[in-house]
Image: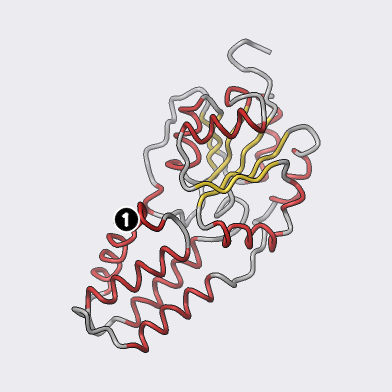
Amino acid sequence: MSGDKPKLTTIGLDADDTLWQSEQFFKLTEARFVGLLAGYAEEADLSARLLQAEMRNLEFYGFGTKSFVLSMIETAIDVTHGQVPAPIIQEILGAGREMLSHPILPLPHVRETLEELGNSFRLVLITKGDLFDQERKLAQSGLGELFDGIEIVSDKTPQTYKRIFDRHGEGPERAVMVGNSLKSDIVPAIAAGCWGVFIPHELTWILEHVEAPTQHPRFKQLNGFNELHEFIAKIS
């Protein structure tokens, strides 16, 4: 093994839209929200104002469903000039509860791939968002027993990845991070010294889009989760 490709010991994996569906439920709820407020603003304007509210609220409420619900309520108040009818607020709250109770099913090839990789590597789930919601998703997915470590963080930065892989492995240089978000899963992990394996998802949130570091020697894009085991074997 060459000096610039040290043996891997640890694999970090994102959760939402990497191991199971997530963004599709946000999109469905946004469509429902737009329908509720169709009499107050155009669809494109409502979506744009909701996104602006989400961006403003990230530093206060973080990521996840609860933050999204608060942003919808704030947007509803804004577009109705403070006159939003109570039944609309009730509908928004109900939509949020539905998001927090939808079934969690692993995406294709996830379970069998994790079972194979777990025979040779430490597996660490690294996800950001609301603690209660992420714990619920992991429990319902049935994948929890496959991980050697679970990390639910407020944000994903190079420092986050260094801390996690120092604790759960032998440092970021001997780790790989797998996920669907270039901004959260790939770019900061590579900056920390990890390999970054990008598995795109068709509905990745717009705020998670950044330019792919295609020229970096530790970046790899795969077409699907079923390709992960073969790639890991090549670099380990």
Instruction: Tell whether 136 sits left or right of 116.
Output: left
Q: Is residue 25 above or below residue 107?
A: below
The amino acid type of the residue labelled 1 equals Met
Residue 43 on image: x %, y %: 28, 73
Front residue of this view, candidates 39 and 203: 39
Q: Is residue 14 above or below residue 169?
A: below
Q: Is residue 213 left or right of residue 80?
A: right
Q: Residue at x 18, y 78 (%)?
A: 81
Quarter placement of the N terminus: top right
Horizontal arrangement in the rendering, residue 213 relative to residue 227 (left or right): left
Q: For the residue carrying disc 1, how many other residues have a C-alpha within 10 Å: few (<14), some (14-19), or many (20+)?
A: some
Residue 85, placed above or below residue 222? below
Residue at the (36%, 56%) spot, across then down:
60
Q: Could you say where residue 123 lies in the image, as x and y percent from the top left?
A: 70, 39
Residue displayed at 62% across by 10% down: 3
- The residue tagged 1 is 55
Residue 26 rendering spot, x and y as whole percentages: 46, 66
